[in-house]
Image (tube, coloured by chain):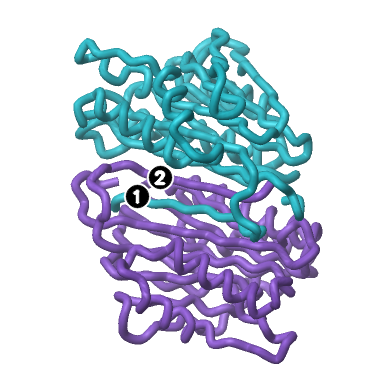
Chain colours: A purple, B cyan
Amino acid sequence: MEPNSELELQIAVAKVSKYAVAESGDSVELIERPNGGVSLVVVDGQRSGKSAKAISNIVARKAISLLADGVRDGAAARAAHDYLRTLRGGQVSATLNILSVDLGTRTVVISRNSHCPVLIAHGREGELELLDEPSEAIGIHARTRPVITELPIASGLQIIVFTDGVLSAGERYGEPWDVPGFVHSQLGDYATQLCARPLADALLSRAVELDRGRPGDDITVVVLSIGERQTADDVRRLSVRFPI
Amino acid sequence: MEPNSELELQIAVAKVSKYAVAESGDSVELIERPNGGVSLVVVDGQRSGKSAKAISNIVARKAISLLADGVRDGAAARAAHDYLRTLRGGQVSATLNILSVDLGTRTVVISRNSHCPVLIAHGREGELELLDEPSEAIGIHARTRPVITELPIASGLQIIVFTDGVLSAGERYGEPWDVPGFVHSQLGDYATQLCARPLADALLSRAVELDRGRPGDDITVVVLSIGERQTADDVRRLSVRFPI
């Protein structure tokens, strides 16, 4: 944390399991980076339920523990791939996204091993940028590597990461949706650039609605927002809530 | 997550650095437990600034990585102690609290290696319970172990954990305060039992106020609340915000 900075970072995660499946095959973990900032790891294990959860747990733990040691994101993603491939003989895949705010370099680093695009907005208006360069899930092929994008920390930056439960929402009912279009229209509605929480909730809630209240897959949404500071205090806040 | 459960868990962390020191010597990390639930690790490294941060990082990472592997809390605390003591030759101490919600046993587990008490409320009225059995910081003496308390998950349960920046707030100005008294009066003010966020913010803000806006030490507050569910959805939510 730099004292007297003018910017604020907000990250929001919203996550729900496939309908009638108690355990989500998606794992999300957050860790503080040893040189300042945070990293978020989002893993979607192959299939759903217990076996998927076991896989996504293993991958998330491996990535998080390397990032906590100060290992760079690209190396952590490669290592998570090698680890899973060795452990499961190349038979089990997982998608892996790493989203890092690096206060050493003052950049946001997005690492993709997933067919799902990552959406980027600079400010609340204008076009969304799509990070959709072909990218492979980890665990199967030799030498899989992440597609990495690095952006300077700037006011108005919004980054939206999700697992494929978002993309496939509504498909069963012949109602596919335009995720970037939805995000774009939402962004225009918020009074501030720091809209991580409402945007993540809106996106998840729309996906569940398209699946008629019974998600056909595990769904995870992560939104990162950077904007002008809304509070004068230097407090760092973390909140968690879920049904038990 | 159990589907159709009636309870909701909320955890709130609020954290601020010592005045004019960019890096907090307190570390807080959150991890999902492999058998269900979450663990929160709170570490206060000896002294403040860079050296304290390095120590608290090391201890938090060690504890988190063991908990992520499914190691029980007491063993993780002992291991973190042994690790720090070996690494730094018994010359450097840290306080360590582990707060776990274990959905396997349906209990909350509180592990203390700190002179700071942990406060517990059952419902918003009635007396606060103080966990203040003598407990040693880790890193110095041989065979240090945590003081562990296990409570059943129940509606109305509130657990308040903090580092010693809370206890010492106001002391420099001859204005020590009654932390349990403050918490008790706050609890009565909230309309719901799920008051983790406002209570953590109120406690931190009062501590900073007693230090006249210039905290004399790193201050961390963690509040865990369990209450009747406020939302019908099964969404798990995580939010982070801090100045960058």
Q: Does residue B112 lie above or below A71 as drawn?
A: above
In terms of depth relative to the viewer, which is nearer, A92 or B218? B218
Question: How many numbered marks appear?
Answer: 2
For residue B129, what is the image quadrant? top right
A202 relative to A58, above or below? below
Badge 1 is on which residue? B242
Query: Chain for mark 1?
Result: B
The span from disc 2 to disc 1 (Cα, nearest Å) is 6 Å
Residue A76: in sight, yes or no?
no
Q: What residue type is labelled 1?
A: Phe
Tag 2, which secondary structure? strand
Q: For the residue marked with disc 2, what is the amino acid?
A: Arg
Judging from the image, mark 2 belongs to the subunit labelled A
Of helix, strand and loop, which one carries label 1? strand
Say whether residue A36 is visible.
Answer: yes
Pointer 1 local density, CA inside 10 Å: few below 14, some 14–19, many at least 20: many
Residue at horizontal 45%, vertical 18%?
A: B180
Look at 58% across and 27% down and name the residue there: B80
Residue found at the very far bottom of the displayed protein = A174
Packing grade of label 2 (10 A; few <14, some 14-19, many >=20) is many
Give coordinates of residue B213: x percent, y percent.
21, 31
Instruction: Please tell me whether residue B118 is drawn above or below residue A12 in the rendered image.
Output: above
Give percent across and percent down for residue B112.
57, 20
Q: Could you say which disc has been placed on residue A146 in the image?
A: none
Picture coordinates of residue A14, whole percent (x, y): 56, 61
Q: Left or right of B81: which side holds B149?
A: right
B115 left or right of A218 in image: left
Q: Which of A162 and B157 is in front in this view?
A: B157
Tell me which residue sits at (52%, 53%) in the image: B238
Q: Circles 2 and 1: CB distance less than 8 Å?
A: yes
- Please state the horizontal and vertical placement of residue A94, each as a whole percent of the image: 68, 68
- Residue that numbered label 2 is attached to: A237
